[in-house]
Amino acid sequence: MMEQSRIAQSIGIALDRFIKNNQEQFQYASGELSQLLRDLALASKVVNREIGKAGLIDIMGSQGSQNSGGEEQQKLDVLANIRFTRALSKGGEVCALISEETESYVDLNNEGKYVIAIDPLDGSSNIDVNVSIGTIFSVYRRKSPEGTPIQDIDILQKGSEQVAAGYILYGSSTMLVYTTGHGVNGFTYEPTLGEYFLSHPDLSMPEDGKIFSINEGSYNSFNSSIKEYLMYCKEKSFVARYIGSLVADFHRNMLKGGIYIYPATAKDKNGKLRLMYECNALAFIAEQAGGKATNGRDRILEIQPITLHQRTPFYVGSKKMVEKAESF
Ligand code: F6P
């Protein structure tokens, strides 16, 4: 056995096998949630392939239309939305899909048990300059009986009701990181085999850290407590790192210890980020990894959404750093 592993090093456990082995951990272990995670993984492989070709074919740049928030849609935003929607509608597990790219939710299959909230391609303006981007997803169990039309109670659920959440980071390598409420595991994509393999088992976020990630260009429109906290970071000679791709900034801070802040500004009283398909998933993952996520005061996962595209200030990362930022 020793000899064998010396000659051919093991590449570890594939995502499919990991999902299967851990299926009994799911609160409702009927196999549908497992299938849904596999569907998301498959769509991400297709999106990853398209992103990898972005400089070669005509899929960079603007689509010439706007998303739900009035922001300019990139061609790849639209493409990723189609890929994920298609993959999630095929299996029949999903009854409704909330996406950054569509104004209202998409009704998929009344028999489906799950509601998905997704940002198919976050940070997509970074594509044209070859910088990391991501996909973020939250999975909820519907509340109304299966087979009946979707209702607001199915759609507008608090983050604390998520049964799974994850992200895909299209970076120097492509990674899928997810939780079902039993810790966080990270998988790295092996493109020649077309598979994700477990590379970061049982991820935990350092309790404290030194990295702070915030768009300081908006400094003049921050309130005094953020300004004071930034001063504190500088007095301590912390490290400033800001990619402007939420998934990439979050992922780095989770591995190294840090805080990401998108605060309220004079212009955006509720910050910029979306509660339902950006903050909730990352808040669930952060907490599962031992970190913390708040809006500067309250736990993100306890915020009751009122609208699909609701925004919230977002403080996420190492527990002690988030607590320190809140204390200002
Ligand atoms: O939600 C969109 C997003 O692109 C995030 O990925 C990113 O962290 C943030 O906006 C960047 O915003 P800004 O350009 O205002 O710093």
Image (cartoon, rainbow, N blue to C red):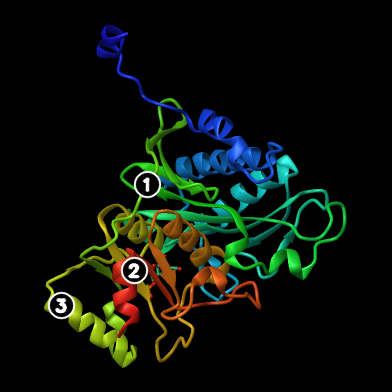
The quadrant in which residue 225 appears is bottom left
Q: Secondary structure at mark 1?
A: loop
Q: Is mark 2 within 8 Å of ligand 1?
A: yes
Q: Considering only vertical position in the picture, is 313 above or below 58?
A: below
Res. 100 visible in picture = no
Measure the alpha-carbon separation of dots 3 and 2. 15 Å
Asked if residue 139 lies left or right of residue 224, the reply is right
Marked residue nearer the N-terminal end (3 or 2): 3
Give the position of the N terminus as an image quadrant.
top left
Give the residue number, with chain letter if any, for mark 3. 234
Give the residue number, with chain letter if any, for mark 2. 260
Q: Is mark 1 within 8 Å of ligand 1?
A: no
**Residue 298: x %, y % from top left:** 48, 78
Res. 283 visible in picture = yes
- Observer-side mark, 1 or 3, equals 1
- The kind of residue tagged 2 is Tyr
How many discs mark residues in the rendered view? 3
- The kind of residue tagged 3 is Lys
Measure the alpha-carbon separation of dots 1 and 3. 28 Å
Measure the alpha-carbon separation of dots 2 and 1. 18 Å
Quadrant where ligand 1 appears: bottom left
Q: Residues within 10 Å of mark 3 (few under 14, many from 20)?
A: few
Residue at the spot 53% in from the left edge and 28% down from the top edge: 17
Res 203 label: 1
Marked residue nearer the N-terminal end (2 or 1): 1
Asked if residue 254 lies left or right of residue 277, the reply is left
Q: Residues within 10 Å of mark 2 (few under 14, many from 20)?
A: many
Q: Are marks 2 and 1 in contact (CB under 8 Å)?
A: no
- The kind of residue tagged 1 is Leu
Res 25 label: none
Q: Secondary structure at mark 2?
A: strand
Q: Are marks 1 and 3 in contact (CB under 8 Å)?
A: no
